[in-house]
Amino acid sequence: MAFAKVSVIGLGYIGLPTAAVIASRGVEVIGIDVSEKAVDTINQGKVHIVEPDLDMVVQAAVTMGKLKASLTPEPADAFMIAVPTPFKEGKKPDLSFIEKAANAIAPVLEKGNLIVLESTSPVGATEKLTAWLQALRPDLHFPGHSSQEPDMYVAHCPERVLPGRVLEELVSNDRIIGGMSAECSDKAIELYDVFVRGNCLKTTARTAEMAKLTENSFRDVNIAFANELSMICDELHINVWDLIALANRHPRVNILTPGPGVGGHCIAVDPWFIVDSAPDTARMIRTAREVNDGKPGFVIDKIEKAADEFKRPVIACLGLAFKPDIDDLRESPALDITLKLAQMGLGKVLAVEPNIHELPEKLIAADIELLPVESALEQANIVVVLVNHKQFKGLDKTQLNTKVLIDSSGLIA
Ligand code: SAJ
């Protein structure tokens, strides 16, 4: 086998499922993470993140002896880097985790190794990674950075899986593979062929980087259109949900769903990488980000106005997750809105989130109570729909007749 041993650097939402799926194909996988807790948990066959079926796949891979986690890298045939790429001050991409990964693997690299960057990255990051590795290992020859025939392979293959469907999409999605050279792309395709059923589409590293940013920006711009429409319709006293349903009957119109804002760790971040690279040209992409970032404030203003009508209203917030039918509360506009309402002291805030059993510490500290939907509705004067979880779909709407309803997600409307 061309890849007898694969190392995955960063065992988070992308790295761990990737490591486990490759291990399930019989390849020896060593996962590297800086968190001792994550490493220990995985080595016990358990998981430290929530994703459907991931626990089973990890447990099987660890039990079979194919997946092992460690704090320190060791030699392997291929290294897949799946570390975070957040933005820092001024919405500039922060590549420090990629640089740390390069520093960590450099000492164990051997001639002929493949290094794949999976982290969503600004254009030029794969070239930077290659330059860092070349500087750290002058004895090896990296593509584009050595005067001699390269003996190392470097490529970018951005992850594209949807949280909540990661295991399925890891295998079934097409992959964009952009090598530092055509040989690098071919080598990386060999690796992805081990576990990907979709097509591996060959391109350059820069195009692959831009493709991933483009996909998430496309979605962000389209969601911004829906969010802007919802605010315009509010001003014009038009039901935006009826409007969208009608407009979407046109064969070439497909408007997405307005919501309380755009959450998650990708769509609200990645477009800024394009804006940072082309600040004067990326005008629509920047505006879309601003529209979506402004939506939670719009929802809060509406709730504040409604609360003015009561002495100390009870406000029930339905949904805390960053999107429907998941339990992921990170970067969630619904959670931010709920917390802000409590901090503003508008009234008693009740949270309903059927996918979790206890509230995060900061919500408890703000005196927010987690309740089943029925009890929250019983007590509430104002009901705010933030996330369209399936558990809310069958709600008895007559129960809401006596309440002020603010439906940011179109559950009832
Ligand atoms: N949202 C709306 N209205 C919609 C659709 C989504 O308000 O019509 C909101 C959601 O509620 C959520 C946010 O947008 O807060 C993002 O949700 P999402 O389901 O659109 O995307 P993510 O962030 O879960 O995953 C995205 C995916 N990218 C695309 O669909 C182009 C996924 O394939 C990527 O792998 C992932 O980002 C990533 O890691 O980059």
Image (tube, rainbow, N blue to C red):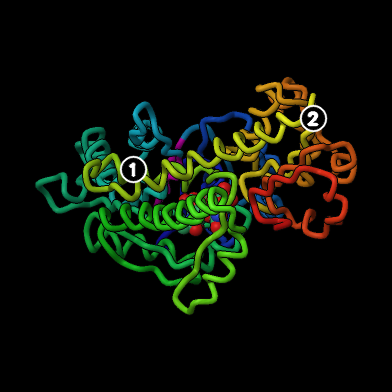
Circles 1 and 2: CB atoms closer than 8 Å: no
Secondary element at image label 2: loop
Secondary element at image label 1: helix
Left or right of residue 103: residue 352: right
Mark closest to the chain's N terminus, 1 or 2: 1
Question: Which disc, if any, is residue 273?
Answer: 1
Q: For the C terminus, give its image quadrant.
A: bottom right
Residue at image coords 69%, 53%:
388
- Residue extent of the magenta highlight: 73-83
> Could one spot residue 169 in this view of the protein?
yes
**Displayed quadrant of residue 124:** top left
74 falls in the magenta region: yes
Q: Position of residue 78 (x, y in %)?
A: 40, 51
What amino acid is labelled 2 in the image? Answer: Pro
Question: Which disc, if any, is residue 368?
Answer: none
Q: Nearer the viewer, residue 72 or 215?
A: 215
Left or right of residue 135: residue 119: right
Residue at image coords 64%, 28%:
340
Left or right of residue 174: residue 379: right
- Residue position marked by numbered label 2 in the rendering: 313
What amino acid is labelled 1 in the image? Answer: Phe
Q: For the N terminus, give its image quadrant.
A: bottom left
Q: Position of residue 353 (x, y in %)?
A: 76, 43
Q: Position of residue 135 (x, y in %)?
A: 21, 34
- Mark 2 residue's CB less than 8 Å from ligand 1: no
Q: Position of residue 105 (x, y in %)?
A: 38, 37
Q: Nearer the viewer, residue 109 or 48?
A: 48
Residue at image coords 25%, 41%:
279
- Label 1 neighbour load within 10 Å: few <14, some 14-19, many 20+: many
Q: Nearer the viewer, residue 249 or 392?
A: 249
> Could one spot residue 38 in this view of the protein?
no
Label the magenta part by its dominant secondary structure: loop
